[in-house]
Image (spheres, rainbow, N blue to C red):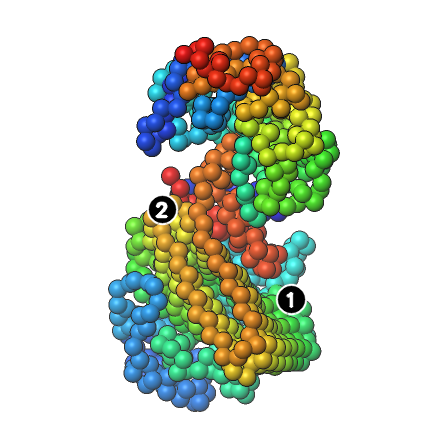
Amino acid sequence: MPAVQETIDQVRLIDVDQYKYGFETTIEMEKAPKGLSEDIIRFISAKKNEPEWMLAWRLEAYQRWLTLEEPTWARVDYPKIDFNDLYYYAAPKNQSGPMSIDDVDPEILKTYEKLGIPLREQEILAGVKTSKIAVDAVFDSVSVVTTFKEELKKAGVIFMSISEAIREYPELVKKYLGTVVPTTDNFYATLNSAVFTDGSFVFVPKGVRCPMELSTYFRINEKNTGQFERTLIIAEEGAYVSYLEGCTAPQRDENQLHAAVVELVALDDAEIKYSTVQNWYPGDKEGKGGIYNFVTKRGDCRGKNSKISWTQVETGSAITWKYPSCILRGDGSRGEFYSIAVSNGHQQIDSGTKMIHLGKNTSSRIISKGIAAGVSQNTYRGQVSTHRKAENARNFTQCDSLLIGDRCGAHTVPYIEARNASAQFEHEATTSKISEDQLFYCLQRGIPEEAAIALIVNGFVKEVIQELPMEFAVEAQKLISISLEGSVG
Amino acid sequence: MLEIRNLHARIAEDGTEIIRGLNLTVNDGEVAAIMGPNGSGKSTLSYILAGREEYEVTEGDILYNGESILELDPAERATKGIFLAFQYPVEIPGVATMQFLKVAMNEQRKARGEDELSTPDFMRRVKEAAAGLQISPEMLRRPLNVGFSGGEKKRAEILQMALLEPKLCVLDETDSGLDIDALKIVADGVNALRSPDRSVVVITHYQRLLDYIVPDTVHVLYKGQVIKSGDKTLAHELEANGYADIIEAAA
């Protein structure tokens, strides 16, 4: 694994407590008035030039949301959010939707350059080394650029911002939106349904294998602004797509909210591979600032023998509340969840998955690796259930936690419900500490402490890293080591 | 090579004194055996030489090539050429043995201001050293020490020793848990590394290992002190008569 050496070099180069993506882009923004009301929702809908049905859908969700209470069951602790003290829409002036790259504000282009996200197709094509990746770049409430749209279209793949898709493919959107995560699902999903601004839409038609990796890069830039991402991915019969999302935000003293909804639909024999590298600003050493990441992600294996796999590397955010799940509806369908959740400093993570077995002969696999350092709290919460008609459901769950230091906590909360006697569920869980013995052993071989921790942690997460697309595996390894900077001593 | 002068050391946590005025000199190229009954401080001595923080030196000094190493951390000592073959090698899950070797070798080279090894050069060195110790490529791909048999663990220790080319090798009970065939392989590996500018301290409970790694000097450790030194015949004497006579004579 060549990445290990890079990881170690990276660790050495960077001082304690460095979030590299914490810079701010100064450009003129257009915002909705502060607060949340029907008028604000109408404002957003108008900005997006939405059809009437979409506005009605949002307003209904808003009415519902007004009746809901914020959930408190997660093992996270934060002051109550004042939902009327936020901006729900912020977009660069003169850009309410994606445009040709030559028309995009150069400051925005510079931002993505700094973040290492390629937005110019010819530059990507010029780089022989990396394989082609299409990018949808979402800046606060708006998608600014989507690359390779034309080339993908030739293959029959639709890849565009969800705002565009609502206008250009209303029937497709109507058919699938809210069918996996209904507007009534939970507090944050309902809020998202009312106020979502942008995200990606992917449609891979029957029999098509998407010719390149798709990715969306979410950037929160504006102060006091919530980002409400909405992503919808559909793979028709026999289709395949691999999709990756990345997230960063500036370093600020105030907390910011990111409440996303992601829906995946896989029809017969289709496969969707969804990877996340989440690196929102985690807050400072004292726990000040950082993103509240309250996310509902769910995949529906609607067709027989369909497959959905979630892979996540979670290193950022002050608070993470996130359970990417699979509904295994089709007979013979398969769900997978591979997760690395790293918490350091004052971060709090409550994350895991749900595998709902409804069809016959369905199987699921959960590999979760939690790493806690500093004074952080890291909880795995997962549910595996079978419907009484789901014959021969199988699940394998492995939850491993690694503690660095003695002031952090790791918790595992599995919920297992088998309503059919033929179900076979296996659950393994371990909690370990990087032991003094392991560290001393590495030191004795001349490996300095930071490098030794990077090595041991890389070993711990290896099974999950292997699941990431190659291009991102190296990046993810670096990120994990950086997140654990300053966690010893 | 090594000079230990009136060394006193205790467990940092509870203050229990383990080493009580130990003196020992090991010359360049010498193989010195340290023997003693359980609890005499043998393993503690190996940890103190390697710089483990759990032990606190309260008096005396350890000179390595004429310089005190007490202020150096374990990684610095390793980089200067002190190697400890562990009695109980530690498992590093998910880290292939090969990968561990590469990181260790390159970290030491970096600390000494040398260039990193090229991959072909690294592979060649590992292949050569592994062959002599009957270590298969398959074993090198497995995570370090995870699921290794007793013999595999000890062979992996000697492999690291061969590749890191230390000046002072400390073997802590390297014979424990080995059958006779494995013992021979390990001893051959150690003997192959004997050279005029490399010294070896062999810590062992039994004479058996010393039939294969023949020492130049033998030292008996008891209650944290060297109570008797001699040549290899001392080991045979201990084997025949046990420690009781020597302990009595020293008392």
For the N terminus of chain B, the image quarter is top right
The chain under label 1 reads A
Q: Closer to the camera: disc 2 or disc 1? A: 2
What amino acid is at disc 1?
Met
Image: A225 above or below B30: below
In front here: A385 or A456? A385
| Residues indicated by labels 2 and 1 sit on the same polypeptide chain | yes
Place of residue A360 in the rendered image (x, y in percent of width and height, measured from the top left): 60, 80
Quadrant of the rendered image containing residue B190: top right
The chain under label 2 reads A
- The residue lying at 51 percent from left, 31 percent from top is A444
User: Residue tagged by mark 2?
Assistant: A406
Q: Number of callouts in the render?
A: 2
In front here: B147 or B98? B147
What amino acid is at disc 2?
Asp
User: Residue tagged by mark 1?
Assistant: A212
- The residue lying at 60 percent from left, 56 percent from top is A466
Place of residue A190 in the rendered image (x, y in percent of width and height, measured from the top left): 38, 79
Task: Say left or right for B40 vs A152.
Answer: left
Residue A196: in sight, yes or no?
Answer: yes
Place of residue B219 in the rendered image (x, y in percent of width and height, measured from the top left): 52, 15
Question: What secondary structure is found at the residue carrying circle 2?
Answer: loop
Tags 2 and 1 touching, CB below 8 Å = no
